[in-house]
Image (cartoon, helix red, strand yellow):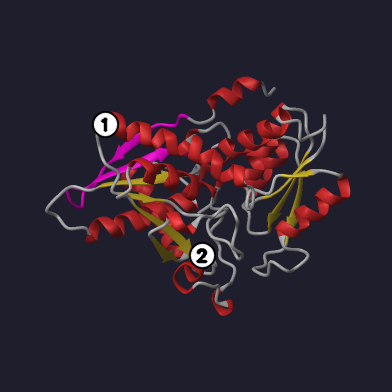
Amino acid sequence: MLTKLMLSLIGKTPIIKLKNTINNHNLYAKCEWLNPTGSIKDRVAKYILEDLINNKKILTNQPLVEASSGNMGTSLAAIGKLYNHPVYITCPAKTGQIKREMIKSFGANLTICKNTADYRDKDFYVNKAKEIAKNIDGILINQYDNQLNTECHYKTTGQEIVNYFLTQSFNIDYFITVGGSGGTISGCAKKIKEIYPQTKVIMPDPKGSVYYDIFYNGAPIKENIHSYKVEGPGNPVFCKSMKLSYIDEIIQFSDDQAIQGCLDLSNEQGIYAGHSSGANYFVAKKLIEKLPQHKSYNILIMVLDSGMKYTF
């Protein structure tokens, strides 16, 4: 039986130093897989739902609706259950079976939508969530455009990062994490740059996502937008939770590179993590190989969820 004690376990995740056998640079990881449902999305689901309740923006037992690649759906299903709100989740067909079962195990209603990179398609999972919310008079959480998503990470995740490095009297030279909705990277980067303005923020982005072309060319390039296998990072449409002004560089990665990063993270660090974390680790290793050796740099990556939610 779920109890609200679970809510006290969300956040305050540790930062650990990883092994670096390549050179003398320091690689750190923030361990978000330690949240109760195994991902960073517990933070956002709790933050947004409590804002709705505390500000009386939601009725008793009013349904919650969300589009998700899996993690936010799981988090909302669990936390919505604690507050006695029915939860409806839409996911693209590429969402793994384990995530699907987790969502349903918390009593949520799950709709699987076809894989499509066309955000105008009525069966695009975000559009399907909007349709369901309208039909059942539900509250659409809308992590992709909800500014509370970014605010959550600015006030919690980002603050925890800054507190750790201030306590250690270390600078943060590089901060690396993928962006899907954009909330994590935008909120954390905003907070980090307030204290460490010299920090370079790097966002790995899957090939097929719009962010790379928007960042470097000012607009998406239609022929570059396509579906991909990795779950979570990137997007076929720009999200309002994403604040590109806090990002210094975007690096593209392939499905195979993200999965290789997952395997390397497990084999080299003993951390069994999901696709997004694999992409972060892959890009961090490439960066470490290129950095000059005359000084030690501090690099922080986000390990966003547990690999137990995936099959590789």
Name the residue at the bottom extreme.
Answer: 223
Q: CA distance from mark 2 to mark 1?
A: 34 Å
- The span shown in magenta is 12-33
Residue 18 highlighted magenta (yes or no) = yes
Q: Residues within 10 Å of mark 2 (few under 14, many from 20)?
A: many
Name the spot of residue 114 as percent of width and height, x first: 72, 63
Name the residue at the left extreme.
Answer: 294
What residue appears at the point 72 percent right and 30 percent down from the top-left corner? 53
Amino acid type of the residue that numbered disc 2 sits on in the rendered structure:
Tyr
Seen from the viewer's position, the closer of residues 234 and 103 is 234
As displayed, is residue 209 above or below residue 49?
A: below
Name the spot of residue 48 as percent of width and height, x first: 65, 37
What residue appears at the point 51 percent right and 65 percent down from the top-left corner? 211
Q: Is residue 252 left or right of residue 297?
A: right
Which residue position holds label 1?
168
SS of the residue at dot 1?
helix
SS of the residue at dot 2?
helix
As displayed, is residue 86 above or below residue 249?
A: above
Residue 280 in sight from this viewpoint: yes
Residue 33 in sight from this viewpoint: no
Name the spot of residue 92 as percent of width and height, x first: 68, 58
What residue appears at the point 81 percent right and 43 percent down from the top-left corner? 138
